[in-house]
Image (cartoon, coloured by chain):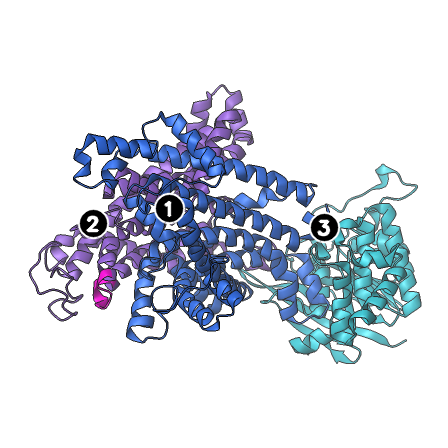
Chain colours: A blue, B cyan, C purple
Amino acid sequence: MNSAEPASGSTGAGRRRPARPGGLPLARFLARRLVAAALLCVGITLVAFVLTQLVPGDPAAANLGQRAIGDPAAVAAFRAKYGLDKPVPVQYLTYLGNVLQGNFGMSQQSHRPVAQDLAEYVPATIELALFAIVLSLLVGVALGVVAAVNRDRWPDQVLRVVSLGGVSMPTFWVALVAFYLLFFKFGLLPGGGRLDPGMNPPPYATGFYTIDAALAGEWDVLSSAAGHLVLPSLVLAVYTVGMLMRFTRASVLEILGNDYVRAARAKGLPERVVILRHVLRPAMVAIITVAGVAFGSLLSGAVLVENIFSWPGLGQYAYRSAVNLDLPGIMGVSIVVAAVYILINLLVDLLYGVIDPRIRLT
Amino acid sequence: MGALLEVEDLTVWLATRRGPRMAVDGLSFQVGSGEIFGIAGESGSGKTMTAMALLGLLPHAARTSGKAVFEGRDLLSMSARQLRAVRGRRIAMVSQDPSTSLHPMLSIETQLTEHMRHHLGLGRSEARGRAVELLATVRIPDPEQALGAHAAQFSGGMRQRIAIAVALACEPRLLLADEPTTALDVTVQAGILRLLHRLRAERELAVVVITHDLGVLSAVADRICVMYGGRTAEVGPRENVLTRPRHPYTRGLLDALPHPEGGAAALRPIPGSPPSLGEVPEGCPFHPRCGYAVPDCRTERPAPVLVEPGHASACPPDPLGGIA
Amino acid sequence: MTASDSPAARSRRDPAARSPWRQPLALVGAAFIVLWVLVALLAPLLAPQGPLDQLSPKLLEPSAQHLFGTDELGRDVLSRVIYGSQVSLPLAFLLVAFAAVIGSVVGGIAGFFGGWVDGALMRLADLVFAFPGIILAMAVAAALGPQLRNAVLAVVVVSWPSYARLVRGLVLSARNSEYVVASRLLGSSAVRTMLVDLRPNIAGPVLVMAALDVGNAVLLLSGLSFLGLGAQPPAAEWGAMVAAGAANFDRWWVGLFPGLCILTVVLAFNFVGDTLRDALDPRTARAIRG
């Protein structure tokens, strides 16, 4: 659970650190990780599939009405339509083949292709999570640095409580409280949805309303979309800020003990420059690793809060698929989430190379 | 030649869990402009803490007393801001291990130019031009290309040359070199020492070389201070200290050096080990390990006294006085 | 947290001050844990009403009679919150215990036997890691049916791999240490070596991880209940009560108090766990992180 729901902002670094390749050029290193990622994706489809096979519930029962379930012909037709009458391994291989062609099957709940559903819902969640991760990185890293340079003094003690508080808050409850105070009670921020009521979404290009609105030059839509992102992303960031703070503090402290920091101070540079240029950069290697994990936990958080903010995203879709035993839906969500996760990890690897020239050069 | 740096009664306390402990105890010395001054001692003798005190880089909880007058101003009573204006600009530091003291992720250009631009207000291209000159001065082949490289791409000796170039960038008057050759191969050591020697001559740069190795000092130092337990054991011109040592500890250090004609048999280590922080014994700090100790050594804390012009020793019984 | 190795940091690190039970945070955390355990044990004595009693008008504001107000069915929120501790606390302990035991056994086997066994088990752990916890737990809980028991199972499913990783690492590093090699030379069997000689070195870190994990377990479990995949109505479970609060979001007291309960419990365990981790030596602390 530590890694799936990282504890106290400290999971994952130990796991990812050894990824630094000894004398492997970045391109080959990335290629190797890409292959591993692809295998992981296949593995995940398998897990998702096995999981759905364990289901004692009958999807036909869950999706056909009360009346239809008593009609054997209707049940058989349902099973045949979704391939549920074939042997299990065949079902899996068929599914895998389809997935590779971008076909996730038909959702038994929305009666539309899952791929089409996902194309609509996934960008909403990703947009939210990206907004939240940027916010978390800005706040979390800054506060973590403050805690580290004030080690064991009062700002550090206070920030420790703050960060532990952040990772201890139930996200869904923070959402409720924030929604009540900031929207309902004081009306400071827009409440639910991605846009003001009555506003039409911008023409679809990326699915990110902010970007699509900017591309189309619809500035009122852009400002509405951005405004609607604030509240949910603030709520989601509570947990990840706590996590990133704690981790930033630890890795900055580790870096501060290095000779090269003393050497930078001996050059008479202002402390600000020493911290920002000489300390934060090496500390970022560990921090972006955690940021990757944090992104995963933002996706988890999104599942919990999307309902409260009427955010038409992956979380709501996943929830509806899960309670309706919509197998193609669940598997589609799982694969997309895993793929996003893997993509983020690849991005993190790439960033290592940008931050640390030793990876680029050796 | 007036003294560039005049350290008087420097005392450094470090905070430990059992309260403050003295790491440097009443140290006094002068360094003249263009002089190479050696400070020798085993680990824990307080030599590194002396350098850190001069730069104002002691750990947060450390306290100092005494004076360290540099170019007419007392470093120990300066504000953090004033110290930053001196550090890197007037006094620079070269530390022991260039593989850890050069930043692994910043380019050589950044590391060479950032303090030039900060202290001297140089523009990017100006600073770059001077960086190329500096690298040429310390004999880095192909300086232009070296600027874009990173520390990991150089050998240990080259890295130390770069570290010295970084230290020299703002044309400081005083260079504090803490074990500048310890982490290097013997063959490379000589090159670094020759470089320091040449720089002193070319730039009238004063250098304080801090080392545990009297052999290093015999090659470059004009004067040598031998420290033990945070105090001066002996201080004087190189010739006098190395050939006519008056303190038994200096004698011990010299006997522990390998000698070209002596072979392995001649090596005589000093028995025992140096005191750790806060456990410096009463009286002469060296008395438990000293073969010449007399009862007074256990109670009297000796201060250095002149034994000949410019040469002082903190050993009142002076057992080596007759031998020399 | 990894301590820096600068001399300055070393000289300032005080073993006495690092003792976890002298840290105010750990004390506050421990006090809250004890308090909540007492509340859970004494719930019938403390609660003014039963958790399911619908004795009052609906959605009353907090008052002297109903300190935390009443919910949408006219039940006393304070009483429900008190009884809620009887659901969340034991289940959190139980599932962390399950996850720790399962994970430790899997990790121990992987570390001790190595080879393809290790490879297979660790790839499985990687797979679980690649999912954000709640989505996997949601899939599992949904697959098994929305019930509290199944939610617990789901959380166990996503929780064990971190223990497996930790124990595997500890076993690998201990396996080659001198005393284990020595005891094998003396003729101890592999299993005996593992149980007798390695256990003391592994139990400590696993317990610290478990302490840190209780908070997460409470969060995940109440999250599933919030989604309707855990405790079912009318059970007094904190996450489900927050969900009721979300349905009546204009009546702030319905959701606020159960959420505060989750927060204080999780915070208490995180205070203790975090201090314990600081007290561990840096290498083990690093292992627990990932």
Question: In the image, which disc is placed on residue C135?
Answer: 1
Number of other residues with Cα within 10 Å of mark 3, as a class: few under 14, some 14 to 19, many 20 or more: some
Hey, what amino acid is under mark 2?
Gln
Q: What stretch is highlighted in magenta?
A: C247-255
Which is more toward the observer, B217 or A313?
A: A313
Mark 3 vs mark 1: give the one in front.
Answer: 1
Residues behind callouts 2 and 3 on a single chain: no
Q: Residue B246 appears at what percent x and percent y?
A: 84, 58
- In the visual, does A284 lie left or right of A304? right
Residue located 90% across and 56% down the image: B194
Distance CA(mark 3)–CA(mark 1)? 69 Å
Mark 2 vs mark 3: give the one in front.
Answer: 2
Q: Residue A91 appears at what percent x and percent y?
A: 39, 29
Instruction: Tell me if I can see residue A116 in this picture.
Output: yes
Question: In the image, which disc is placed on residue C86?
Answer: 2
* Magenta stretch encompasses residue B144: no
Chain letter of the residue beneath label 1 in the structure image = C
- For label 3, the residue is B289
Distance CA(mark 2)–CA(mark 3)? 69 Å
- In the visual, does C266 lie left or right of A224? left
Question: Which quadrant holds residue C125?
Answer: top left
Q: Residue B109 appears at what percent x and percent y?
A: 77, 62
Residue located 23% across and 40% down the image: A64
Hey, what amino acid is under mark 3?
Arg
Residues behind callouts 2 and 1 on a single chain: yes
Question: Circle 2 — which element?
Answer: helix
Hey, what amino acid is under mark 1?
Ile
- For the residues labelled 3 and 1, say whether their Cβ atoms are less than 8 Å apart: no
Distance CA(mark 2)–CA(mark 1)? 26 Å
Residues behind callouts 3 and 1 on a single chain: no
Which is more toward the observer, A64 or A264?
A: A64
Instruction: Tell me if I can see residue A10 in this picture.
Output: no
